[in-house]
Image (cartoon, helix red, strand yellow):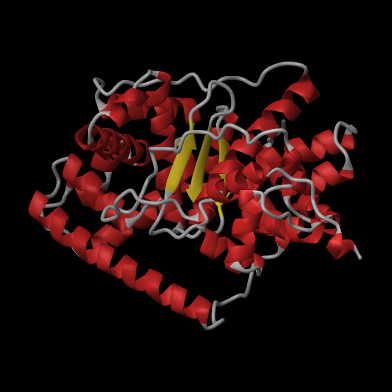
Amino acid sequence: MAASVKALVKHELLVWARTSAHLSVEDAARKAQVKEEQLTAWERGEERPSIPQLRKLGRVYKRPLAVFYLPEPPKTFDALRDFRRLPAEMAGKQSPELAFEIRRARARREIALDLYQELTGEEPKAFLSTASLTEEPEVVAARLRDVLAVKRTEAASWRNVYDAFNRWRGALEEAGVLVFQAEDVEVSEIRGFSLSERLFPAVVVNIKDAVVGRIFSMLHEATHLMLREGGLCDLLEETSRAQERIEAFCNHVAGATLMPQAWMLDEDMVRQHKGTQWADEEIAHLSQAYRVSREAIIRRLLVLGKTSEDFYRKKRKQLQAEFEAQQEEAQQRRALGLEGGGFAPPDRIAVSTAGPFFVRLVLESYHQEKITPNDLSSFLDVRLKHVPKIEHAVLARSAASGAHV
């Protein structure tokens, strides 16, 4: 009987929900398991979907049911233009998965801001560090590193790349920057992006990327935030050359933040090295010491005048070929169901994608009865039965780091 009840929804909202999810009629119909002609009739207002059919469209478009009952389609945000892509990739059509991650990052930022103000009665501290393209990248990197307060002795104590990732992420969040991870977007489409705002700007990195790649992307996007505070975003609209200049600047700052010049030149291996050629073992040793990729090491050696452009290009080409082969193998293994270790449990995914700061904020709001159990489940994107494990994981991490809302 319920299937015959028609949803009193405006056809303009059906069109908006699909197009804002970056889905064609063909793809949307296939995912919703309806005929294209049927979906087209709904979007033209010739017919209406049933309530169960509308719910299914909501799941496909990743929109709550209530959005279909708005008086008119919401004004959508402009597409982001500062994606960090693989070097060979060109800007193109957004996938539905990327469109969803952009929406989710914006929604989480707004939720975080509302909850923080509700809990504390004040605004969060702003990320005030700024930069200009006219500055030396090394100077900007030193400023960013001072803000993040990650010391050399501390970095040397990290047991693995996950320790490094968590520390850099925590440092950015302490500085007022939210750090999220995208789940379902391929690395070939995006490695990271940022949302530039005065309060709680956000950095998003791709969880499918290598951990060292995510660390670099965090600092690359943090540099974008510094530039945007300086009012330099408009350059992105001018020319591809301006875009390339900004990307090169952000790469330089990220590399210099992770591998300060004084630290690198003080390394025995670097100080005593002769010539411009570097053995794979030497590159791997430095990569391990700084918890960065091998490509980041050779780029930094080039910037510091410790290798040649020819060696850098040759080695970079080799490393990119290795990376692409690894990505292809990983995709094949996923397709065959051979991924080692299976899927991560929902509680771990929630903390990893939303970030410890956001999760603590939601949990504290719940315990102070600022939000309902349904809000808690919705904000963390998990069922309530997973919350105890999430609490345990976040509280244990908070106790170890001394973090708090």
Identify which residue is drawn at 68% across, 48% down: 63
Where is residue 339 drawn, in percent x and y? Answer: 54, 77
Residue 219 in view (yes/no):
yes
Identify which residue is drawn at 14% across, 46% down: 306
Res. 248 image quadrant: top left
Res. 12 image quadrant: top right
Identify which residue is drawn at 39% across, 32% down: 223
Instruction: Check the image and name the residue furthest to the front.
Output: 46
Relative to residue 199, is residue 351 depicted above or below? below
Residue 158 in view (yes/no):
no
Specify whether 344 is left or right of 361: left
Tally the marks.
0
Q: Quadrant of the C terminus?
A: top right
Identify which residue is drawn at 66% across, 57% down: 349
Where is residue 54 drawn, in percent x and y? Answer: 74, 55
Q: In which quarter of the image is the N terminus?
A: bottom right
Specify whether 359 is left or right of 314: right
Residue 95 vs residue 379, the one in the foreground: 95
Relative to residue 32, is residue 242 depicted above or below? above
Specify whether 388 is left or right of 253: right
Res. 281 image quadrant: bottom left
Where is residue 153 drawn, in percent x and y? Answer: 46, 40
Residue 283 vs residue 228, the one in the foreground: 228
